[in-house]
Image: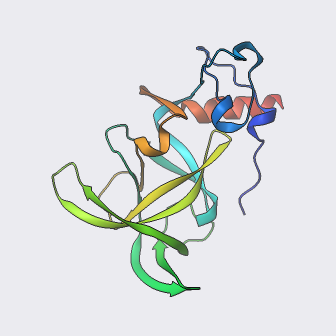
Amino acid sequence: MFRALPTAANMTYRMPRKYNVSSHFGATDPSSAGSGRHDLVVVGWQEMVGLPELGIEQLPVKLDTGAVSSSLHVEHIRYFRRNHGDWVRFDLGAGMGATKDDCRCESRLIGFRGIQSSSGHRSHRPVIETMMVLAGFYWTIELTLANRPTMQFPVLIGRDALSGRCLVDCGQIFLANSRYTALQREI
């Protein structure tokens, strides 16, 4: 079971640079009150995230500022109708950080999105909405679903999910998690 994390309202980051997450996460920073600044969570290009609505506690992901949308590796995608709405059922494979070895998930289908891969291949992928947890903060993101077993990371987080919330330091990995772990020890 995914355990509750501290909220942004009772968290303070001690970062080498000053970034204010107040407008996006509900926390306030007295030093920037009225200044109009928006602080961002500094993250590395690789981080551990949770997708609690899908039963994933922690999973290594690539934060890819070159990609617009985010993608989740799934298998056995099936579409169905429920309560006059479109839904999708899919399986997360073993090793995906799920609470069970194999996890079958269901989510409301938001729509389909045309995606062009880095190799130039175009496809239409189903899109779902789910909660993402990164460094103790959480927000809703859209994920495209694709069977992508040859990729190094089962989850790719693109610009749409990061915009206005995170600053990616492309020379570092696991920045957010190390800061959050240190913060947890202080609380």
Q: Quadrant of residue 105?
A: bottom right
Task: Indicate the position of residue 139 as horizontal and vertical percent values.
Answer: 61, 48
Task: Indicate the position of residue 182 as horizontal and vertical percent values.
Answer: 71, 29
Q: Residue at x 62, y 64 (%)?
A: 53
When the figure is inspected, residue 15 is found, relative to residue 110, above or below; the finding is above
Q: Residue furthest left?
A: 120
Side of 101 where 80 appears, left or right: left
When the figure is inspected, residue 33 is found, relative to residue 91, above or below; the finding is above
Quadrant of the drawing holding the N terminus? bottom right
Side of 67 where 29 appears, left or right: right
Task: Indicate the position of residue 92 as horizontal and vertical percent values.
Answer: 48, 69
Foreground residue among 20 and 47 = 20
Quadrant of the drawing holding the C terminus? top right
When the figure is inspected, residue 175 is found, relative to residue 34, above or below; the finding is below
Q: Residue furthest right?
A: 187
- So how many labels did they put on this image? 0
Q: Residue at x 72, y 36 (%)?
A: 26
Q: Residue at x 54, y 72 (%)?
A: 107
Q: Residue at x 28, y 66 (%)?
A: 124
